[in-house]
Amino acid sequence: SAVISQKPSRDICQRGTSLTIQCQVDSQVTMMFWYRQQPGQSLTLIATANQGSEATYESGFVIDKFPISRPNLTFSTLTVSNMSPEDSSIYLCSVPPGTGGLTTEAFFGQGTRLTVV
Amino acid sequence: AQSVTQLDSQVPVFEEAPVELRCNYSSSVSVYLFWYVQYPNQGLQLLLKYLSGSTLVKGINGFEAEFNKSQTSFHLRKPSVHISDTAEYFCAVSAGGTSYGKLTFGQGTILTVHP
């Protein structure tokens, strides 16, 4: 199983600023996923980060607001741009494990708890 | 596309009592099914998963779930809960192929175990 490190673990930011969240995986993975968990809510997929191509965004999420980088197979960043209090959430990165064969569960980083004031 | 419905937003139960957390899903393709647990102020932990084969799946911490294809359900059960099981539980599905790993989550069920 993969080990995922996410930084920062939490942050308090001023509205109008941007925050970049880093996700480091201890093995090479083709796809990485970014999720958002708003207060008291479930998790919603923001986008899929593929190495060597543009990220694929889910409905309701756009690149200008959540730009994603994927410079190599072990690292990705998610930026939350021009933040507002509505962006206060936990942001999590995730990877599907294994290479080849029947892969099973998704693994999650510990999340970044963002508060926008 | 897939969707997941967790039928109970909150489930209170007394310690050592049995519990069932209900999950129904909808999908036009075969899916993989998962249950995750989130303890307060912590990340997600996988409890168990269903891929194929036996419809009764056993996971960690004494939890088990049964996949029922005809009822499109994947209910989570534990015969005797502990105070430490107090947490939020999420049911999730993933399709296979190029969509593998993209999870659709239910809204979560908060399990509160009382002494």
Image: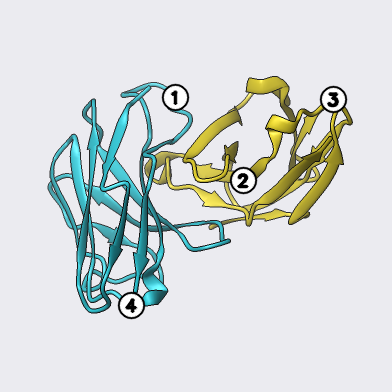
Q: Which mark is residue A102?
A: 1
Chain ID of residue with mark 1: A
Toward the front, the furthest residue is B115
Q: To which residue does mark 3 refer?
A: B79
What residue type is disc 3 on? Pro
Q: Residues within 10 Å of mark 2 (few under 14, many from 20)?
A: many
**Where's residue B98, x and y in %?**
37, 44
Task: Check if mark 2 and mark 3 are on a common chain.
Answer: yes
What residue type is disc 2 on? Phe
CA separation in Å, label 2 and label 3: 19 Å
Q: To which residue does mark 2 refer?
A: B90
Compared with B49, A78 (above or below) is below
Q: Secondary structure at mark 2?
A: strand
Task: Check if mark 1 and mark 2 are on a common chain.
Answer: no
Q: Please tell me whether mark 1 or mark 2 is closer to you in this view.
A: 2
What residue type is disc 4 on? Ser
Compared with A111, B32 (above or below) is above
Q: Mark 1 and 2 residues: CB-CB less than 8 Å, in contact?
A: no
Q: Which mark is residue A84?
A: 4
Chain shown cyan: that is A
Question: Is residue B53 in view from this perspective?
Answer: no
- How many numbered discs sit on the rendered protein? 4
Mark closer to the chain start, 4 or 1 = 4
Q: Mark 1 and 3 residues: CB-CB less than 8 Å, in contact?
A: no
